[in-house]
Amino acid sequence: MHHNETPVLSVRNLTVRYGHGCPECFDVENSARPMEKNRCMICRTVWAANDLSFDVYPGEVLGIVGESGSGKTTLMRSLYFDLPPTSGSAVLRDYMDSKKNIWEASPAKRRMIRNSIMGMVYQNPILGLRMDYSAASNIAEKIIAAGSRNAGRMTARATELLDAVEIPVSRMSEPPRNFSGGMQQRVQISKALANNPALLLLDEVTTGLDLSVQAKVLDLIRKIRAKYGISILLVSHDLAVIRMLADRTIVMLDGKIVESGLTDQILEDPQHPYTQQLVHSLI
């Protein structure tokens, strides 16, 4: 389906470990490893992400599903430089033509990647927004961070994006702390899109929202993808969200990828016992 396209993102062997590890838990091939979920029972090291490899292709939505503690958020936070990985590499098509590991980039280059190539939408809008700046200023801040200073262009872009996420123009100058949770998420999405990123990272963006609001936000993500042709990495513990949006899906459990494939295939014929359990609880 994609074989002739360069992935927007390629991650290889990402590992995030809390603790030094010991010979027992480093023996990954050993089926009798003394692990309790993703923690070593001998040295107490937590393997939050364990040897993850995957690609995201142009214009696709890749879903990552798994329970709390499965490593999904660790993976997202590593990609957005909020958390340093223990080992592994990630390359971006739009950064040095996929030739350089982003985790070895200088702080200035990392800021450039965060501001221009990737956009992040956190589960908690407080992490992604300045709650006391206006909605428009939140977007302007992101544009300025990418090096633009043209006030007219910024206002136009803020207006266009807030319109795209259905925030009325009349409320552009209001701070997000005045907004409902669903509106805050929509402002956060518009801010993440400010500099036309190639890749949008969405971490549990509908968790905690009312069902009707969730549906609106999901519909909005669909529209944005159609309009901007952006690639999306979508993390959720909710298979219904994944079913609605993701082309392909990765299933995570205890820091590892246990299954991956086309979303339809995984939902119709899950192979791993954990995925089977997830799918049957959805039906």
Image (cartoon, helix red, strand yellow):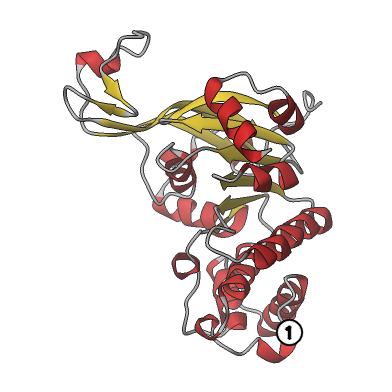
Quadrant of the image occupied by residue 263: top right
| Towards the viewer: 80 or 214 | 214
Task: Classify 173 as above or below 62.
Answer: below
For residue 72, side relative to residue 147 (left or right): left
Q: Which residue is mark 1?
A: 168
**Residue at the image position 64 percent from the left and 69 percent from the top:** 186
Relative image position of residue 77 (x, y in whole percent): 44, 48
| The N terminus lies in quadrant | top right
| Towards the viewer: 87 or 253 | 253
Quadrant of the image occupied by residue 136: bottom right
Relative image position of residue 81 (x, y in whole percent): 43, 49
For residue 121, side relative to residue 130 (left or right): right
Relative image position of residue 83 (x, y in whole percent): 37, 47
For residue 62, side relative to residue 220 (left or right): left
- Can I make out residue 56 in this image? no
- Can I make out residue 142 in this image? yes
| The C terminus lies in quadrant | top right
**Residue at the image position 48 percent from the left and 51 percent from the top:** 109
**Residue at the image position 62 percent from the left and 75 percent from the top:** 183
> Dot 1: few (<14), some (14–19), or many (≥20) neighbours within 10 Å?
few
